[in-house]
């Protein structure tokens, strides 16, 4: 596996809370762990967007495994740890982790999209 220089940036953001205006906020958590089959990149993370009352409305994390949707070949045999939650009750969909920088780009792009959606008049 090639070295992921974005991991240092992600870890530097650990425990940051970013005000998004209108009561919305983002919480970033990331720390190193021993690489494993479930977490081959050696980073545990949780990037979440919250509404004014504190409910998570978007999240990218690898805290638990999620089953791949049936449309994926061998879905019943593989569990994905990297995943995203698209709304409050979403159990998670696999997220294809490429590197830490791309994770940040993907999360903030989707957070911006969600915020634009919830702020529509």
Image (spheres, rainbow, N blue to C red):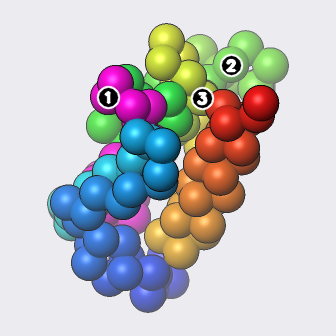
Magenta segment boundaries in residue numbering: 35-54
In the figure, is residue 88 to the left or right of 27? right
Distance from label 3 to label 2 (Cα)? Answer: 15 Å
Residue 5 pos. (x, y %): 44, 87
Q: Residue at x 31, y 37 (%)?
A: 63
Q: Which residue is mark 1?
A: 54
The relative height of residue 60 versus residue 14 in the rendered view (above or below) is above
Magenta stretch, main secondary structure class = loop
Density class for disc 3 (Cα within 10 Å; few <14, some 14-19, many ≥20) is some
Density class for disc 1 (Cα within 10 Å; few <14, some 14-19, many ≥20) is few
Residue 10 pos. (x, y %): 36, 72
Q: Which residue is mark 3?
A: 86
Residue 12 pos. (x, y %): 26, 78
Name the foreground residue: 11 vs 79: 11
The relative height of residue 93 versus residue 17 in the rendered view (above or below) is above
In the figure, is residue 97 to the left or right of 28? right
Q: Which residue is mark 2?
A: 69
Q: Residue 49 occupies which quadrant of the picture?
A: top left
Give the label, 1 or 3, closer to the camera.
Answer: 1
In magenta segment, residue 63: no
Distance from label 1 to label 3 (Cα)? Answer: 15 Å
In magenta segment, residue 53: yes
> Mark number for residue 98?
none
Q: Residue at x 59, y 15 (%)?
A: 76
In the figure, is residue 37 to the left or right of 87? left
For the residue labelled by badge 3, is the local secondary structure a helix, a strand or a loop? loop
């Amino acid at each position: 596996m090639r070295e992921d220089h974005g991991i240092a940036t992600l870890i530097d953001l650990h425990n940051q809370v970013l005000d998004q205006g209108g009561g919305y906020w983002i919480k970033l958590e990331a720390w190193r762990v021993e690489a494993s089959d479930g977490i081959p990149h050696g980073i545990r993370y949780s990037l979440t967007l919250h509404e004014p009352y504190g409910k998570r409305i978007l999240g990218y994390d690898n805290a638990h495994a999620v089953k791949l949707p049936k449309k994926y070949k061998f879905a019943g045999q593989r569990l994905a740890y990297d995943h995203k939650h698209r709304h409050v009750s979403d159990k998670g969909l696999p997220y294809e982790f490429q590197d830490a920088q791309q994770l940040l780009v993907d999360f903030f792009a989707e957070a911006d999209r969600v915020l634009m959606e919830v702020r529509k008049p």
